[in-house]
Image: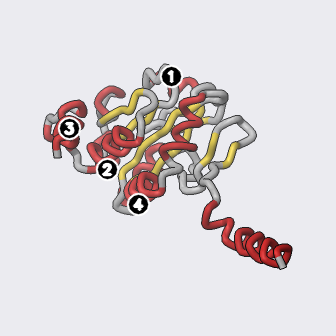
């Protein structure tokens, strides 16, 4: 009788295993972790921003590199949190670029560069870095590189700060002249 009971318990646990399965991002051939909801882009940033705006979302680029432990943590810690991932997924279109990559990307000004050349142009020096851009393509016209980006997440942030940065951009607090650090203090005090 004990065997039968253990067998039944084992069967029930195996049937419910997906409910307990840990969130696992996919590791690509290039050594970068992938999210299935990241934009599969033709790497024309003008089109990507326009597509995000048309969907009522904001546009961001996440820069990563092979072997980066903090890049892995963005995927296995931050995006593994259902609340964080779903909140961002519902409001942002994200394109993933490789700090050392050779794929060709068309910048907002029409210039075609490799990923690594674009990283140098935008002064992205380490990973992960997330760049946030205006909510319309018109807001990029005639602006210098430093003026196009509305905010930047320089490095790895734990979940509270990670989500807060996305909220900060979504709420356009940068446009109201509020620094991210002040926003965090305000949020922490609530």
Mark 2 = which residue?
136
Residue 99 horizontal side relative to residue 82, left or right: right
Coloring basis for residues: secondary structure
Helix, strand or loop status at disc 3: helix
- For residue 24, above or below residue 33: below
In percent of width and height, residue 69 lies at 59, 29
* Residue at x 45% of width, y 31% of height: 156
As measured in the structure, the alpha-carbon distance from the residue carrying label 3 to the one carrying label 2 is: 23 Å
Picture coordinates of residue 60, whole percent (x, y): 42, 43
Q: Secondary structure at mark 1?
A: loop
Task: First in sequence, mark 4 or 2: give its number.
Answer: 4
Which residue corresponds to mark 4?
90
SS label for mark 4: helix
Percent across and percent down for residue 57 are: 36, 56
Which part of the image, by quadrant, shows the N terminus? Answer: bottom right
Q: CA distance from mark 4 to mark 1?
A: 27 Å
Q: Determine the CA span between mark 4 and mark 2.
A: 18 Å
Mark 1 / mark 3, whichever is N-terminal? 1
Q: Which residue is mark 1?
A: 126
Q: Nearer the viewer, mark 1 or mark 3?
A: 3
Earlier sequence position, callout 4 versus callout 1: 4
Give the alpha-carbon distance from disc 1 to disc 2, as whole Å: 27 Å
Label 1 neighbourhood size at 10 Å, few (<14), some (14-19), many (20+)? some
Q: Residue 47 or 183: which is nearer the viewer?
A: 183
Q: Which residue is mark 3?
A: 183
For residue 102, the mark is: none
Is label 4 in contact with label 2 (beta carbons under 8 Å)? Answer: no
């Amino acid at each position: 009788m004990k065997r039968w009971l253990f067998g039944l318990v084992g069967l029930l646990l195996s049937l419910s295993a997906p409910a307990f399965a840990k969130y696992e991002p996919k590791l690509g051939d290039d050594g970068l972790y992938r999210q299935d909801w990241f934009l599969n882009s033709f790497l024309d940033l003008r089109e990507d921003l326009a597509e995000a705006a048309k969907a009522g979302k904001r546009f961001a680029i996440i820069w990563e590199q092979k072997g980066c432990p903090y890049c892995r943590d963005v995927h296995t810690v931050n995006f593994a949190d259902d609340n964080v991932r779903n909140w961002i997924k519902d409001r942002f279109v994200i394109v993933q670029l490789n700090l050392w990559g050779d794929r060709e990307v068309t910048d907002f000004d029409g210039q075609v560069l490799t990923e690594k050349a674009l990283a140098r142009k935008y002064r992205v020096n380490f990973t992960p870095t997330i760049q946030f851009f205006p909510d319309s393509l018109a807001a990029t016209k005639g602006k210098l590189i430093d003026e196009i980006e509305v905010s930047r997440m320089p490095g790895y942030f734990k979940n509270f700060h990670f989500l807060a940065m996305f909220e900060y951009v979504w709420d356009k607090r940068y446009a109201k002249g509020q620094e991210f650090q002040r926003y965090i203090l305000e949020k922490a005090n609530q």
